[in-house]
Amino acid sequence: MVKIVTWADCGLPPASPILNAATVTKSGIIYTSGSVGLAADGSIPESIEEQTEIAIKSLETVLKTAGSSLNSVLKALVFVTDPALIPRMNAVYSKYFTTCPSRSCVVTALGSPAFKVEIELIAEVE
């Protein structure tokens, strides 16, 4: 049976009423939902740097709740709204992902025009 990690388990506001924060498989693989740059107070910072920082810190909390950390990430999937933003997102991303896990980066529209980045992770339970 899989383990569900809820937003409440993580102490984070729900990103969506129909999504959980993560699913942990019987074999110990964690699949997170996407995380965006939504601040705890409900605001959305203007800069991609701040949004990336918030998204990663939220994911760090989700992974910790699921029994893991950013050091155990196997794969990251990053969505950005403009290819010109990728170097700025990378500057923040590289501070947190020092193990350089595999990653894909897709340019696309997100759920709200205010969001510039969304990140989801696959990690191992430690």
Image: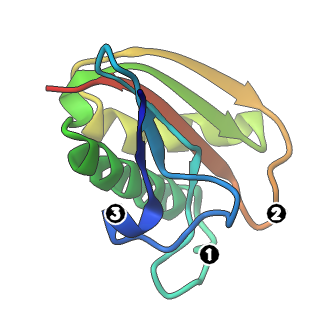
Does residue 69 sit above or below 111 in this rendering?
Answer: above
Front-lying residue, 88 or 27: 27
Q: Are marks 2 and 1 in contact (CB under 8 Å)?
A: yes
Total labels drawn:
3
Q: Quadrant of the N terminus?
A: top left
Q: CA distance from mark 2 to mark 3?
A: 25 Å
Mark 3 to mark 1: distance in Å?
23 Å
Residue under numbered circle 1: 44
Q: Which three-letter amino acid code belongs to the residue tagged 3? A: Asp
Choose top left, top right, bottom left or bottom right for residue 42.
Answer: bottom right
User: Which quadrant does the C terminus fall into?
Assistant: top left
Quarter of the view holding residue 85: top right
Q: Residue at x 67, y 63 (%)?
A: 16
- Looking at the rendered structure, the kind of residue marked 1 is Ile
Q: Residue furthest front?
A: 1
Amino acid type, callout 2: Ser
Residue at which label 2 appears: 112
Disc nearer the start of the sequence (3/1): 3
Regarding mark 3 in the picture, which secondary structure is present there?
helix
